[in-house]
Image (cartoon, rainbow, N blue to C red):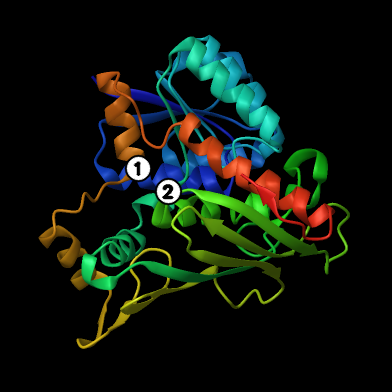
Amino acid sequence: MTTRVGFFGGGFIANYHGKMLHTSGADASIVAVHDPDEAKADAFARASGAFPVPSEQELIDRVDAVYVCTWTAEHPRLVALVAQAGLPVFCEKPLATNVDDARGMVDVVTRTGVVNQVGLVLRDSPAFLLLKHLIERPESGRVMSVVFRDDQFIPIQGMYASDWRVEPDKVGAGTLIEHSIHDLDLLEFLLGPAVSVSGRSAEFHQHDGIEDVVVATLAFESEALATLTSIWHDVVERPSLRHVEVFCENAYFVLEGDHLGPVRWTRSGDGHGALDGGELIEELQHHGVDLRNPDHAFIQAVQTNAPAYPDFAEALRAHVLTDAIYRSASAGGTSIDV
């Protein structure tokens, strides 16, 4: 039976997930959208075929599963509303503006037992999956260090046009929680558990409480060390880009681009190599690495009442790291155990 899907929020990220659902071939139909901004709701409706509904309850009454794609401060309330109605919920990252509210959201979905998933979609990026595969090969040796840079034009302009991202009561803070929570999640995805973090931040755009530069250092159980630099600038001509260098004992890897690379490498005694695009996909398939559309996977979990991935409980860890880095920055960069 086709799963009827509703969206709270009709902006940029809602349209992204709507397109991902459409192209995935999932047996789902987007039937309803609610957004206080009627223009956004109408635009999303035209693009997706959904019906704009005037109230949250009407949306819940019409659907089998809900996407929460509003500004961050609304996530806890809307997730609770959906979960208490017994409906599966997909919540865009970050879960909440602070770690305590994120913990509360984990409690809500655990108590109600609903299928739940978080939009940490880069765990399904072919480029990052290949990087993970390469650094875990025995011949690479142990990971020694990672240099991770993530830059993006501040998303109150351009294609994002999210004015609320400089309003602390709606967003909580700036580039670290709103954008680079992906990166903190990926660093543990690649390297395993971190044991301590430190960080410094700055506000070049002078939006009070909204940092636009963060430099963080993370130490891992494996003894690897990583730096993360997250930047919101004003170069609208430059797309959102990640550049990740991984130094292993016997290999060097560099990833450029979030989805299809390229991923390049230099191995001790084995020369150089690079893969991107279709060749990168073929390499992953050759090694049996699971490639999936996370939105399709959510619908499958809903239809089979199976656990979804990554769920709220797993996503909480990135909030713990984010909170610790903010506390470190507030204390002048002191190291904090995590």
Q: Are marks 1 and 2 in contact (CB under 8 Å)?
A: yes
Quadrant of the drawing holding the C terminus: top right
Mark yes or no: residue 163 visible: no
> What count of labels does the image hold?
2
Residue furthest left in the image: 286
Horizontal side, residue 139 vs residue 167: left or right: left
Residue 166: give x, y in percent of width and height. Answer: 79, 52
Q: Could you say which quadrant of the image residue 41 lies in? A: top right
Q: Earlier in the sequence, mark 1 or mark 2?
A: 2
Q: Which mark is residue 294?
A: 1
Does dot 1 land on a helix, a strand or a loop?
helix
Question: Would you place residue 7 above or below residue 173 in this image?
Answer: above
Mark yes or no: residue 329 visible: yes
- Which amino acid type corresponds to the residue marked 1 in the rendered image? Pro
Q: Considering depth in this image, is 322 or 88 the residue closer to the camera?
A: 322
Q: Considering depth in this image, is 159 or 107 the residue closer to the camera?
A: 107
Residue at the location (56% across, 49% down)? Answer: 195
Q: Considering depth in this image, is 66 or 31 the residue closer to the camera?
A: 66
Residue at the location (62% across, 31% down)? Answer: 102
Horizontal side, residue 248 vs residue 335: left or right: left
Mark 1: few/some/many CA within 10 Å (<14, 14-19, 20+): many
- Which amino acid type corresponds to the residue marked 2 in the rendered image? Val
- The residue singled out by tag 2 in the image is 121
Q: Considering depth in this image, is 296 or 158 the residue closer to the camera?
A: 296
Residue at the location (81% across, 47% down)? Answer: 167
Q: CA distance from mark 1 to mark 2?
A: 7 Å
Residue 18: give x, y in percent of width and height. Answer: 42, 42
Residue 314: give x, y in percent of width and height. Answer: 46, 35
Does dot 2 land on a helix, a strand or a loop?
helix
Residue at the location (61% across, 55% down)? Answer: 179
Mark 2: few/some/many CA within 10 Å (<14, 14-19, 20+): some
Residue 213: give x, y in percent of width and height. Answer: 73, 66
